């Protein structure tokens, strides 16, 4: 193991330490600049380049070297640091394109299968940043099923679960890939009901994406959901959660109106979201929220049809 670790650092030095100087832009901190906003940086070892305090945006050549290192090394410390660096750089739109063109998406994507949960989380975070680019989503969508399995089978409220939910949320901003989550809607509601506040908010962001698409309405309303879901409409629920569950109801109702289904009794089974949202208990909660102390909540309730 020691020789393998040593070999990893030697490779890192060869890959990232070679080269003379790079002139790169400082995008976040303005001090210690020279010339026309550019400054010379000495060549760096892998340890320096992947250091969390390194706040410069890497250029294409540096990113290529970093991806090469990430693909070859088996050292978990280097892998994790490299993923963090790739993820930080993927927050910039230009680098989202560069990383894709360098073949970096499958390199990063391969790390979500790593048994090390910290590495898996960093890989998911990097993919999440990369997925903001619509063209990148075409390559990232191949990982959706694996991410869903990890999110719903892994530890509740874990960093891996939250990172996976963030990636799925980004991947469902448009309607293009939402259908790939159809078989996981019931699981989403289960995590919503059992997760902590942060997990609830992240699941609701994802469900809101799905609820705005009429093609997903039947799948949402047909999902088997525990009756405790209606407790999210209680007046004491945190505003960031309450507003989102109200918006979820509003979006679904709007989609039903667009499709002309409100006048027809759909064939949903008992225990489904449909029976919860359009039942008497939910109607009572909506009437109670009309008198809620928060003006945003009151306004949101008035948009939903009267009960």
Image: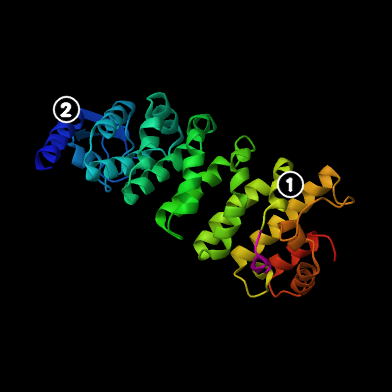
Residue beneath label 1, please?
A: 218
The image quadrant where one finds the N terminus is: top left
Question: Could you say whether the residue bearing mark 1 is in a helix, strand or loop?
Answer: helix
18 to the left or right of 50: left
C-alpha span from label 1 to label 2: 57 Å
Residue 67: x and y in percent read: 30, 31
Q: Residues within 10 Å of mark 2 (few under 14, many from 20)?
A: few
Question: Could you say whether the residue bearing mark 2 is in a helix, strand or loop?
Answer: loop
The furthest residue to the top? 101
Residue beneath label 2, please?
A: 18
Q: Please give the range of residues in magenta.
A: 225-230
Residue 227: x and y in percent read: 68, 67
Is 117 rendered above or below residue 295?
Answer: above
Question: Which quarter of the picture shows residue 85?
Answer: top left
Taking the spot 82% from the left edge, 44% from the top edge, the residue there is 258
Sequence-wise, which precedes: disc 1 or disc 2? 2
Taking the spot 46% from the left edge, 42% from the top edge, the residue there is 128
Residue 179: x and y in percent read: 63, 39
Question: Which quarter of the picture shows residue 244?
Answer: bottom right
Q: Main secondary structure of the magenta part?
A: helix
Q: Residues within 10 Å of mark 1 (few under 14, many from 20)?
A: some
170 to the left or right of 90: right
Is 197 rendered above or below residue 288?
Answer: above
Indicate how the structure is coloured in the image. Answer: rainbow
251 to the left or right of 44: right
């Amino acid at each position: 193991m020691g020789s393998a670790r040593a070999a990893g650092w030697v490779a890192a030095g060869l890959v990232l330490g070679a080269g003379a100087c790079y002139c790169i832009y400082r995008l976040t901190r303005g001090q210690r600049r020279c010339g026309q906003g550019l400054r010379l940086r000495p060549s760096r070892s892998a340890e320096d380049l992947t250091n969390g305090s390194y706040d410069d945006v890497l250029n294409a050549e540096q990113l290529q070297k970093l991806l090469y290192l990430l693909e070859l090394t088996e050292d978990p410390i280097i892998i994790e640091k490299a993923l963090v660096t790739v993820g930080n750089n993927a927050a910039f739109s230009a680098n989202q394109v560069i990383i894709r063109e360098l073949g970096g998406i499958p390199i990063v994507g391969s790390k979500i299968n790593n048994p090390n949960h910290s590495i898996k989380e960093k890989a998911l975070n990097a993919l999440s940043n990369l997925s903001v680019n619509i063209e990148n989503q075409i390559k990232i969508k191949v990982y959706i099923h694996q991410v869903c399995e990890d999110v719903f089978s892994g530890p509740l409220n874990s960093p891996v679960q939250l990172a996976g939910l963030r990636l799925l949320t980004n991947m469902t901003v448009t309607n293009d890939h939402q259908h790939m989550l159809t078989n996981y809607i019931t699981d989403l509601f289960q995590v919503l009901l059992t997760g902590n506040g942060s997990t609830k908010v992240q699941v609701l962001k994802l469900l809101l994406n799905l609820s705005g698409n009429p093609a997903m309405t039947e799948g949402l309303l047909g999902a088997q959901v525990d009756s405790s879901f209606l407790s999210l409409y209680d007046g004491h629920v945190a505003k960031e959660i309450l507003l989102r569950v109200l918006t979820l109801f509003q979006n679904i109702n709007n989609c039903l109106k667009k499709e002309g289904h409100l006048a027809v009794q759909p064939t949903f089974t008992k225990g489904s979201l449909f029976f919860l949202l359009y039942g008497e208990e939910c109607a009572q909660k909506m009437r109670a929220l009309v008198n809620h102390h928060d003006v945003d909540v009151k306004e949101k309730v008035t948009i939903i049809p009267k009960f």
